[in-house]
Amino acid sequence: MNRFEERLLRLRAELAKTGAEGFYISGEPNVAYFTGRKGNDCAVYVTQYEAFIITDFRYREMAQEIVWLSYYETGNGNSTAAFLNSRPEKLIGLEKDRLSLAAYLSLKEKCPEKDFMPLDDIVLKLREVKDAFEIEATRKACSIAMKAFDHMCGYLRPGLTEKQAAAELEHFMKINGADDLSFDTILITGAKTSYPHGVPGDDVIKEGDFVTMDYGCKVAGVTVHFVDAGTDSGPIIVQKAVPVLEDDTPETLHARIQVQEHIAFPEALNIIASGKYRVEGRRVRIG
């Protein structure tokens, strides 16, 4: 059994608690979680005994490589609605935070014999618990992102445009093992550094300018996100206090700090994965 089949088993256990007989998964990150492929233009349908990937002919070869999922090809009269109508399940769960209103209304109209129920993002809850593969991928993504920061500290210089610097940052991450970018890279200078989502342009870096870099890379689907505009100056997600004892040495204090780091890092990952936070200025509000 591979890690994707193990994830399906965990999903089925959670699905059984909801009462839904089937679960239509359309959100790209969640489709990727069960397929190991990019989830664009694909969906996954899971019951207690079967699992399918639903996509069109463009992804036929890719879908057929995913041997733990049966393949349903849309097009030529076949559609998601036709697939669901062919299934015996009556109560079908939908991702309420992922499926568009238009798609939901279309399924309601075309599948009059089916009942649909909105589900909380149970896949996201599964994704909060990282397996050994994801942990190793996270370590690799962290390493690439940190190397990229060190590289850019030596690369940035007056005379470069924001576009040139951003291209160098992205190129460095990809040739050093990144599978993809987490999002569009932000690398801006001068007065634009106050923009929360500035777009790299033709502005030239000048002597003494600040440079803001907001970037991330994906390794096997795991994302690490860096925001760099100063030293340890980003909004704090999790913070742990470590008392300094009278008989502490640098070694004993460092050991106790590491214990708290190992607690704080998973807590921060869980907060980020849950989406239940917002950044307000220099504060991270959770809940």
Image (tube, rainbow, N blue to C red):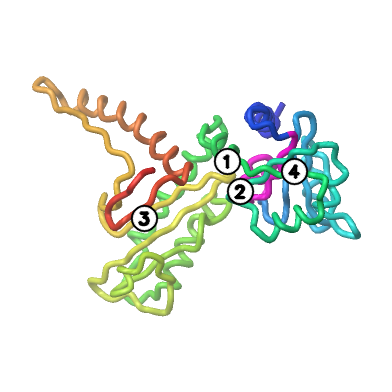
- Which marked residue is nearer to the observer: mark 3 or mark 2? 2
- Measuring 41% from the left and 34% from the top, which residue is drawn there? 266
**Decide: marks 2, 4 in contact (CB < 8 A)?**
no
Disc 1 element: loop
Q: Residue furthest right?
A: 76
**Decide: marks 4, 3 in contact (CB < 8 A)?**
no
Which residue matches tag 2? Answer: 96
Which of 153 and 124 lies nearest the eye of the viewer? 124
Q: In the figure, 159 relative to 45: above or below?
A: below
Sequence-first tag of 2 and 4: 2
- Relative image position of residue 251 (x, y in whole percent): 21, 25
Marks 1/3: CA distance?
Answer: 30 Å
Marks 2/1: CA distance?
Answer: 7 Å
Marks 3/2: CA distance?
Answer: 30 Å
- Identify the mark at residue 284; answer none if there is no mark: none
**Decide: marks 1, 3 in contact (CB < 8 A)?**
no
Which residue matches tag 3? Answer: 227
Disc 3 element: strand
Q: In the figure, 235 relative to 257: above or below?
A: below
- Identify the mark at residue 120; answer none if there is no mark: 1
- Measuring 43% from the left and 72% from the top, which residue is drawn there? 200
**Crowding at mark 2 (Cα within 10 Å: few <14, some 14-19, many 20+):** some
Instruction: Classify residue 244 as left or right of residue 202.
Output: left
Q: Is residue 29 magenta?
A: yes
Tell me the kind of residue under disc 1: Asp
Sequence-first tag of 4 and 1: 4
- Which marked residue is nearer to the observer: mark 1 or mark 3? 1
